[in-house]
Image (cartoon, grey):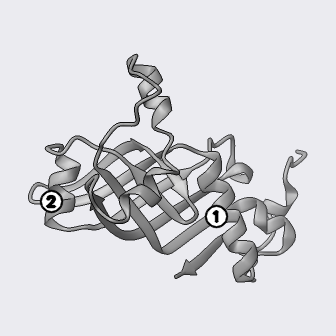
Amino acid sequence: MPLTNPWLAEPTPTRKLDRERLEERILNLLSSQNMCVLATAGPDGPLATPVRYYPLGLTLMFTAAPRSPKMRNIAADPRVSVGVFAPLVGLASSRGAQVFGTARVLAPDHPDHAHHWSAFRWQNEHAERGRSLTQPPEETLVVVEAQRVVYTEHWLRREGYAPRQHWRR
């Protein structure tokens, strides 16, 4: 039987990408997707929530209703994990990242809010809700700066690299 990707049948390589190439691949993934799964922990146990995000380098940002379960969990324990993945067709196309960090909740008057908000594409959400595109909202922003990333891309095996790579700030 012919194999579409014979390199997947070979032993899994263990070679690591250099930091610059790994960061480039992580940035490509984060910039080419807009949905993630945010994992938080709370009094009722773990919570995994689909969230639309916007990247700013290796920082992910999203808005959330202040009284949502994820926001209550973040207030109790700001350590989070964020899963970002590209659509999967088969093992060869498997590509994703687990981003680990501490969620920071930035109110509109927080000194870091304007810097992050400038990269947040709020216009998309306003257009969906029929709101004015001339007046930016005053919303709380949740920011997760990557402290650690576990990046998986099986296509790396073709080039002799391990499909799972680890990055730390």
Give residue 84's position: percent from left, percent from top: 52, 53
**Residue, disc 1:** 26
Residue 139 appears in the figure: yes
Residue drawn where x is 74% and y is 52% of the image: 92
Judging depth in this view, the residue of 3 and 33 nearest the camera is 33
Whether the residues at callouts 1 and 2 have beta carbons within 8 Å, the answer is no
Q: Which mark is residue 42?
A: 2
Residue 58 against residue 162 in the figure, above or below: above
Residue 53 against residue 164 in the figure, above or below: above
Give residue 165's position: percent from left, percent from top: 63, 75
Farthest left residue in view:
43
Judging depth in this view, the residue of 8 and 55 nearest the camera is 55
Residue 67 against residue 56 in the figure, above or below: above
- The image quadrant that residue 40 belongs to is bottom left
Give residue 141's position: percent from left, percent from top: 33, 52
Which of the two labelled residues, at mark 1 and mark 2, occupies the earlier sequence position?
A: 1
Q: Is residue 80 left or right of residue 152?
A: left
The amino acid marked with disc number 2 is Gly
For label 1, count other residues whose C-alpha is less than 10 Å away and answer few (under 14), some (14-19) or many (20+). Answer: many
Residue drawn where x is 62% and y is 41% of the image: 87
- Distance between the Cα atoms at labels 1 and 2? 28 Å
Give residue 17's position: percent from left, percent from top: 74, 79
The amino acid marked with disc number 1 is Ile
**Disc 2 secondary structure class:** strand
**Disc 1 secondary structure class:** helix
